[in-house]
Every structure is written in C-alpha cells, then in structure tokens.
C-alpha cells in the first residue's frame, strides 16, 4: 500500500498514464483507445466514490465490459492506484465491491493482472483491521476474502471466477485422485469460511431493529452480499458432492473433521440465508434459496440422490436501486429519427400528404384552381425540405456540441480530481513544513537558552577564581594550625584510648543485662499465650455444651408431642380392628360358598384337561413336522442356489465363513439339549422349534458363504470346500428327517454333520489371510517378502505383456494388430508406473522405519505397529494381485475370448489398490518428506497410466465392434410404432437392471470394507468370540 501511496504522490495526473502518452498525430485506433480509457476512468470514478450509497449497476457493468474489451484489467488498476483507498473507508469498501464483481464476471485475465497487487491488498487489510468500528473492520475482512479468492483460483485454474461448473468438470478438477479431492475440499472450506465471516460481520454492523435495508447507508453495506450469496451457493453444492465422493473412497473416521466443519458452516449458512431472504432490499434483486432442514447424511451413499443443488435466481428486471437510464449514441439517433417521424406525421395531419386526394376540398374553396394549389403544395414541400435540412444541421451541430461538452466535462472532472490531488498534496506539504517550522523554533529557543547558560557559567567561573585565591590564603593558615593540632592530638589520643577501654567494658555488661531481660520477657509472653489458648478452648466447650442442651430440650418437646400422636393412632387402630373382625366373618361365609363351587369346577376341569392334552399333543406334533419341512425347504433352497451361476457375482471371506460354522456348531448342541428337554417334558416345544428353524437358516447361510468363499480360494481348496458344503447340506437333511417320529430318535446322530463342519473349518483356516494369524515377530520379514513378491509379480506381468505383444505381431494384422499394440503398450506403461510406485513405497517405508524405530530393530518396529504393517501387506498384495488379473484379462482380450469391460475394471482396481498403498504409507510419513512427495507423484503416474489403459480399451472396442446400420425405410408406421414400444420396454428393463446392479455393487463394497477392516485391523479390540445361540436367534428374528 505504501507503493500505491508513493505512486499517488509522484503522478500529478489522476488519469491513466496511457492518456498522457497519446501523440498529436495518432490515428483512429488511438482516438478510440483514448475515448475508451476516458469512459472507463469516468465510470470507475463514479462507481468508486466517497458517497455512502450502493454502487450503481450501470457503472459496474461498464467496468466489466471494459475488461472484456481490453482483455485484462490494466486500465482499472491504473485508475484505482490513484484513489486514496487507505484514507477513506467507504471508498475502500466500494472498491472491494467493484473488484469482486470483476473477479466474478470480468475477463479471465483480470485475475492475472491483479496478482501483482496481492501484497498491497494484504497491507491494506492489516491497516483497516486496526479500526474496530464503522467500515474499517468490514474493509479488512472483505480484502482478506478477495485475497483468498485470488489464491483459490490461482491454485485451481479449472474453476471460473463465477464458480459455475458441471459435475463432469468438477470430477476433472480432482483428476480422479482422492488426495486431490481431499485437498480441494479443505480449500473450499477455507474459502466458504471467509465468505461466511464477511456475511456475519455485515449483519452484526447493522441495526436490525430498524429498516436499514431501505436506507442508502444500509444498502451500501448490503449490496456486496449479492456476490457473496452467489459464491456461497456454489461452494455449498460442490462441498456436498465432494464429501459424498470422499466417503465412497475413504473410511468414515478419517473424514470426521470434514463432517464437523461442514456441520458448523451448514448451520451458519442456513441462518444467514434465512435472515437475508427477509430483508426488503434483497426481495426484488435476488431470489435466495433455502437450505434443507437437516444436513445431508454422508454415511449413506444413496443420500446423494436426495441432494438438491441450491440455485440463486436474479430476475431479469432487477437492477440497482439508484439505477437510471443511459442513452448511448445509437439511442440518441433513434430518438432523433422517431422525433422526425413524429414531426412528419404531425405535418401530414395538418396539411395532408402528397398521396391524399384533396382531403380539404381545395378545388371548391375560395375559387382556387388546381394549378395554384399544386404550386402552393410544391412551395410548401420546398420549405419543408429546407426546414428539414436546417433541422438535420442543427441536430448534427447539437450532437457534436454535446459530444464536445461531454469531453470537456470529462476533462474538467479529471482536472478537478487533479486539483484536488494537488490540494491534498499541498496540504500535506504545508503540514510537513509547519512541523519543520515548529521544530526550528524549538531549536532556536534551545540555542538562546544555551547562550544564556554559557554567559552565566562564565560569570560564575570568574567568581570562583576570586574565591579560589581567598581560599588559597586561608589554606596556608590552616596548614600551620593543623600542624599545631597534630601535636595536641597525640596527647589527646592517649587519653582517649584509656577512656575507650573503659567504655568497651561498660557496653559488654550492658549487653549481658539486655540478654537476660529478653529471656525473661519471652518466657512471660509464652505463658500468656498458653493461658489464652486454654481460655479459648474452654469457651468453645461451653458453646458446644449449650448447643447440646438446646438439642436435648428440643428432642424432649418432640417426644412429648409424638407420644400424644401415638395414643390417638392406637385408639383409631382399635376401632379399625373391630371392623376387620366383622368383615372377616362375612368373608369366611363367602369362602365356604366358593369352595363348593371350586370342587364342581375342578371336576369339569379334569375332563377338559384330558381333551386339551390330546389336542395339544397333536398340535405339537404338527408344529414339529411343519418346522422340519420348512427347515428342509430352506436347506434345499440353499443347495439349489449353490448350483446357480448368479451366485458367483459376489465373493466372501474365510473368517466370516468360520464365524458361521461356529454358530452352527453351537446351534447343533442347543438343538440336542432342546430335544432331550422335549422328550422329558413334551409340553415345552418352543425351544425345539426355535432350534430347528435356526439350524436351517444357519445351515443355509453357511452353504451360501461357503460358495462365495470359493471365489477367492485357489482351485483345489475351492473344490474341497464346495464338496464339503454340499455334503454338509445332505447330512443336515438326513438329520432333520429323523426328527419326525419320537420312536426313531435314536437314529438321529449329528456326528456326520459335525465331521462336515470340521472339514469346512479346516479348509477355512487354510484360506484365512496370513496377516490374521501371523506372529508379531514375523511381520518385519513378511513385509519385505510381500513387497518383493509384488515386484516379482510386476516383472512377470511385464514379461507376459511383451510375450503377448510379440505373438500378436506375428499372428495379427490390420486393425486388430493396431488395437492389440495400443492396449498392450498402455498396459506396459501401467506396469512401469507401478514399478516406480513400488520403489518409491520401499524408500518411504525405509525412511519411516529409520525415523520411528529409535534404538529398536526394524522387526520390533513392525511388531509394535502391527496394524500399520498389516495394512502395508494387504495393500502390496492387492497391487500384485491386480496386476496379475489385468494381464490375464488382457490375454483373453487379445485372444478374442475376453471382454473389454473386464480390462477396464481391472485397471480401476489397480488404481484403487495403489491409492490404498499410498494411504497406508502416508499414515506414518512426515508431510514434508521428499520420499512422500515422490510416492504421491508416482501414484499420479499410475492414475494417468490407468486412464490411458481405459482410453485405449474404449477406442479399441469402438474400432473392432461393428455397429448395425439402422434402416427404417422399408418399415410401415405400425411396425415403427411397435419397434418404438419394444425399445422403450427394453430401456426401462435395462434401467431397472442397472439400478439393481448399482445397489448390489454398493452392498458388495460395503461388505468388502467390513471384511477388509477385520482383516487389516481397522477396528480396535481382540477377535470377536462366536455368537451365542440367543444372539443368533435375535438376529434372525
């Protein structure tokens, strides 16, 4: 800001420099440029002035159009640099408003031309921040917001100044990298925080108890909030969409801070939108949207479809309250033409036109013949033509004079501004000279005082010299007297020594007497203090005794009162006792009657119980049979689903299968106990029915999860697990068939079922991820082995791709060879990028271990941070597995037996695995580590290579697949209508299938995250124990 102030003092002309550099012989282009700069200067000075009114829309619009005309903001800044922004708060406030509109709606180069003044804006913000009242604090916060807006758009050049973007452009801004989306969300939070801070500060500065929105001062403060509302609506919409995207890629706990910050800003923005919509000033200028009652639930992915983007509507007729019509040159010409037409029409109305057929009947009036009338008409036409020519000349002259006057007015305004600037400069110079004059006066007064003090010092020096001569004479006399006195002093000294010795003896005796007196006084003081303490203790005991005496007296009085109450109560109880005796006699009579009725009822009940018992026994048998048949149907349905190919669209985990097996084992034990209880007490059948039903459902779940677990297992364990699940289902059906009759219950044996469960358990334990049962001491070696295995898998995949490329070149030609080369080339680039990522991950891992282990060994560090180590192992496995699967998919595509979609899915899976590896490595890394930056760069390279694979796959698919030509020329109207209906039906079916598949994919990802969290130790605590029978029953119910 100091540089801006100095430039104001150095340049006397307030107009831009380019105005003063125009040559005399400049051409038409120079004249147009000069006219443009003069118009811009006038508009900027009118828009940014010291009057406390809102900025007029027409002036701001002229400034915006000027930036598009010159493709930049050089003229704007050349004019603004000469305004005293640091001395007038209202002027600075209106500058911020106009500059905000230019950043939003001006030319994109406005941001580039304004970056050089960013430091000046910061200095001005700090300067205005020292004022706590009026526009000072508002200017400070607004300047800080503008600086934040400039920095945001500099970091994110994809975002335009008005923040209007589509969803596709928003995805492209993050470059499909979760780290970029994470950082972009944080920057949007900071940007929105500055907007809300300005919003809240403006409302706090207004007296809302009065209608401030209809006053010019209130409108001056409220006008910039229209730009803030437009920015806030877009920032809120983009923040919601980015948070949903982040929740689909990262765990919910990682984004807890984002959700808390969003909730705070959502509450503020909702309140400010509501308060703004109630102000009269905004009702005719802008339609402010209302946010929903509750914030979006980011933990539910389907809530994104419920989100409605807030839309701010600015009516077409909306304008500034003080706007006034502006007549340009074309408007003036149109007005002149319209006026001329009106003049012509008026003349024709009065005198008639040449095409009219004698409307005034001139042939029959006053004897005027036709020749005279024609002559008169011709004369009038000539006069009218002359008048029209004079009128045109007058209009031209008036228009030219008006333009000259406007130019003169602009020059006078510029000269006035210059004179005001010179007057201000002269006032500053006069103040400076006045200060120098005061300083010179003070110096002259100090000099006069110094001269007077010097004269006084010289006079005193002469007096001192005279005094010195007199003192010298007296000194000689004193020396003589001193010698005499020394002789006398020797004699007196001897006498004094004797007297001093006597005085010392006297002082020693006096000190001894004082010490003895001090001891006696101390003893007396201690005795007095002890007696005082004894007296205080006696007083306290006396006060305590008095209190106890008062308590005893109170208790005696209460005892007397309670005794009288008890006597009255005893009398009342005696009366009640007599009444109870009489009631008891009547109740005994009723009891005898009821006993007789009870005997009769028992006789009838015994017969009824026999019939009910037979009926209940039949019903129990029927319920047991129905439960058994329902259980067999559930198990049979599970075995049937086990054979369906649709089951293989999802995959399960071994640990979940083992938990199901443990639940089934406990259920079998509970079933045997319930069967024994049923044989002992046939009336209690509820537990048996629960056990049978639960066994059927748990068996079904076990068979289904066994089938899904086979998808992740190697071929041999998968075959063994498939056979074991089928055998277990058959043994369960056999066991349930023995439960129908009571007489053959001895044949029901669960040994075969338990044997099948044991086989399933053994196979499931073999399929468990090694990270779940590995010893802590082996983690360090396992990390190195897994990283080496991943590197080896990448090398093998690269070699296979080269081999496939060689075979394709040898056996394919034409388009197929071109497609194969493009796909395999992109796959090779992807493998090279993954190899770079693995190397960078190893370097960062080595740096983390070296910086975090201290005096411990690397193995001890890995054992101490086992959860982090298991995450690294899982991520490296996922990268290697993804590379192998992608090579297999590419091999099938080259051979013509695969799908292009499989290759694209594998590419996306590799990108997700690399993101997981980067996230696992980033947890314990230093944010300023160069190895971390190298790893992130390698991750972006993998993402770019993945995008290249997808792009080459899509282009290859479009080249190979031939599209059927749609020829409808030979079809009739009925046939076309039928085809149209069939196409609509097919579209609806496909949309329904797509929706179902998306829901299924969401559930699969949700389950995958749960299983991955258990496998990699995301959750705290020990391994969960198998659920009890009662817990499983509750879950099924």
Image (cartoon, rainbow, N blue to C red):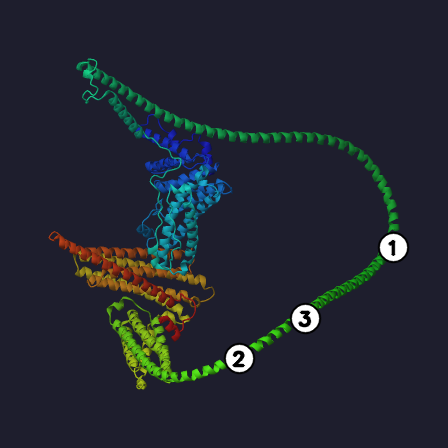
Secondary element at tag 1: helix
Asked whether the viewer can see residue 80, the reply is: yes
Q: Mark on residue 584?
A: 2
Q: Crowding near pointer 2: few (<14 within 10 Å), some, many (20+)?
A: few
Q: Toward the viewer: 1036 or 785?
A: 1036
Whether residue 673 is situated above or below residue 59 in the rendered picture: below
Whether residue 470 is situated above or below residue 606 in the rendered picture: above
Marks 1,3: beta carbons within 8 A:
no
Q: Which residue is mark 1?
A: 502
Whether residue 49 is situated above or below residue 287 in the rendered picture: above
Secondary element at tag 2: helix
Q: Mark on residue 560?
A: 3
Q: Is 3 placed left or right of 436 in the picture? A: left
What residue is at 17 percent from the left and 14 percent from the top? 371
Secondary element at tag 3: helix
Q: Toward the viewer: 691 or 810?
A: 691
Quadrant of residue 572 within the rendered picture: bottom right
């Amino acid at each position: 800001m100091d540089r801006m102030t100095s430039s104001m003092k150095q340049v006397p002309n307030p107009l831009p420099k380019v105005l003063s550099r125009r040559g005399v012989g400049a051409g038409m282009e120079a004249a147009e440029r000069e006219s443009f700069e003069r118009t811009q200067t006038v508009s900027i000075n009118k828009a940014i002035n010291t009057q406390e009114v809102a900025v007029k829309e027409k002036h701001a619009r002229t400034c915006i159009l000027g930036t598009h005309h010159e493709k930049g903001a050089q003229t704007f800044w050349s004019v603004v640099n000469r305004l005293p922004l640091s001395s007038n708060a209202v002027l600075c406030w209106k500058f911020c408003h106009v500059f905000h509109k230019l950043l939003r709606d001006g030319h994109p180069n406005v941001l580039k031309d304004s970056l050089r003044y960013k430091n000046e804006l910061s200095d001005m913000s700090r300067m205005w921040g020292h004022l706590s009242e009026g526009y000072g604090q508002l200017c400070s916060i607004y300047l800080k917001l503008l600086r934040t807006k400039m920095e945001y758009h500099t970091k994110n050049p994809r975002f335009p100044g008005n923040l209007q973007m589509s969803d596709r452009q928003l995805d492209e801004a993050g470059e499909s990298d979760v780290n970029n989306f994470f950082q972009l969300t944080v920057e949007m939070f900071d940007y929105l925080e500055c907007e809300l801070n300005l919003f809240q500060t403006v409302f706090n500065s207004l007296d809302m108890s009065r209608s401030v929105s209809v006053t010019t001062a209130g409108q001056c403060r409220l006008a910039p909030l229209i730009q803030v509302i437009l920015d806030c609506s877009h920032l809120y919409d983009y923040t919601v969409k980015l948070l949903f995207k982040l929740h689909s890629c990262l765990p919910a706990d990682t984004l807890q801070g984002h959700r808390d910050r969003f909730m705070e800003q959502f509450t503020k923005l909702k309140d400010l939108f509501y308060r703004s919509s109630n102000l009269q000033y905004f009702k005719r200028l802008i339609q402010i949207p209302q946010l929903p009652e509750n914030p979006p639930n980011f933990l539910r992915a389907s809530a994104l479809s419920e989100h409605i983007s807030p839309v701010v509507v600015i009516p077409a007729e909306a304008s500034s309250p003080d706007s006034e019509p502006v007549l340009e040159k074309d408007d003036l010409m149109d007005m002149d033409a319209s006026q001329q037409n009106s003049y012509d029409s008026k003349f024709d109305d009065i005198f008639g036109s040449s095409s009219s057929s004698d409307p005034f009947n001139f042939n029959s009036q006053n004897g005027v013949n036709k020749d005279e009338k024609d002559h008169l008409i011709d004369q009038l036409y000539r006069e009218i033509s002359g008048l029209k020519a004079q009128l045109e000349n007058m209009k031209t002259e008036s228009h030219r004079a008006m333009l000259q006057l406007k130019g003169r007015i602009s020059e006078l305004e510029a000269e006035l501004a210059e004179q005001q600037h010179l007057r201000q400069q002269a006032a500053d110079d006069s103040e400076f000279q006045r200060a120098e004059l005061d300083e010179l006066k003070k110096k002259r007064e100090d000099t006069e005082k110094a001269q007077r003090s010097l004269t006084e010092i010289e006079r005193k020096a002469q007096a001192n010299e005279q005094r010195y001569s007199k003192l010298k004479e007296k000194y000689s006399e004193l020396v003589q007297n001193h010698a005499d006195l020394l002789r006398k002093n020797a004699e007196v000294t001897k006498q004094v020594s004797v007297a001093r010795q006597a005085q010392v003896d006297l002082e020693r005796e006096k000190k001894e007497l004082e010490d003895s007196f001090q001891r006696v006084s101390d003893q007396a003081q201690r005795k007095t203090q002890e007696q005082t303490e004894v007296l205080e203790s006696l007083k306290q005991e006396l006060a305590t005794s008095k209190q106890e005496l008062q308590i005893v007296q109170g208790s005696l009085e209460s005892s007397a009162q309670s005794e009288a109450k008890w006597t009255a109560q005893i009398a009342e109880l005696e009366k009640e006792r007599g009444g109870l005796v009489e009631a008891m006699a009547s109740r005994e009579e009723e009891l005898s009657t009821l006993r007789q009725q009870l005997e009769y009822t028992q006789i009838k009940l015994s017969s009824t119980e026999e019939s009910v018992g037979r009926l209940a026994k039949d019903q129990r048998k029927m319920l047991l049979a129905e439960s058994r048949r329902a259980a067999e149907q559930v198990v049979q349905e599970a075995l049937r689903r086990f054979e369906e190919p649709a089951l293989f669209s999802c995959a399960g985990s071994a640990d979940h299968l083992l938990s199901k097996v443990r639940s089934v084992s406990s259920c079998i034990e509970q079933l045997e106990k319930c069967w024994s209880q049923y044989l002992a007490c046939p009336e209690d059948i509820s537990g048996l029915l629960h056990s049978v039903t639960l066994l059927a459902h748990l068996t079904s779940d076990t068979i289904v999860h066994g089938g899904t677990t086979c998808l992740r297992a190697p071929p041999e364990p998968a075959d063994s697990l498939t056979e074991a699940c089928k055998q277990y289902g058959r043994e369960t059906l056999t066991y349930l068939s023995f439960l129908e009759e009571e007489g053959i219950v001895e044949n029901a044996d669960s040994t075969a079922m338990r044997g099948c469960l044991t086989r399933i358990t053994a196979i499931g334990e073999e399929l468990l991820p090694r990270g779940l049962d590995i010893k802590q001491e082996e983690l360090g070696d396992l990390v190195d082995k897994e990283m080496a295995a991943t590197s080896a898998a990448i090398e093998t995949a690269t070699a296979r791709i080269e081999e496939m490329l060689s075979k394709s070149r040898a056996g394919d030609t034409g388009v197929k060879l071109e497609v194969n080369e493009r796909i395999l080339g992109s796959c090779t680039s992807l493998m090279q990028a993954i190899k770079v990522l693995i190397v960078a991950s190893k370097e960062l891992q080595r740096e983390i271990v070296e910086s975090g282990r201290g005096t411990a060994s690397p193995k001890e560090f890995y054992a101490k941070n086992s959860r982090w180590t298991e995450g690294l192992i899982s991520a490296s496995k996922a990268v290697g597995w993804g590379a192998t699967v992608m090579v297999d998919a590419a091999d099938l595509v080259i051979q013509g037996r695969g799908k292009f979609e499989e290759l694209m899915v594998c590419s996306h899976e590799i990108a997700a695995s690399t993101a997981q590896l980067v996230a696992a490595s980033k947890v314990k890394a230093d944010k300023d580590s160069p190895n971390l930056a190298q790893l992130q760069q390698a991750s972006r390279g993998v993402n770019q290579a993945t995008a290249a694979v997808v792009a080459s796959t899509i282009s290859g698919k479009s080249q190979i697949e031939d599209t059927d030509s749609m020829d409808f020329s030979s079809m009739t109207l009925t046939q076309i209508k039928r085809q149209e209906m069939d196409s609509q039906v097919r579209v609806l079916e496909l949309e329904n299938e797509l929706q179902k598949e998306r829901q299924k994919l969401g559930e699969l990802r949700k389950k995958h995250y749960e299983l991955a969290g258990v496998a990699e130790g995301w959750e705290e605590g020990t391994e969960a124990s198998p659920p009890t029978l009662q817990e499983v029953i509750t879950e099924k119910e």
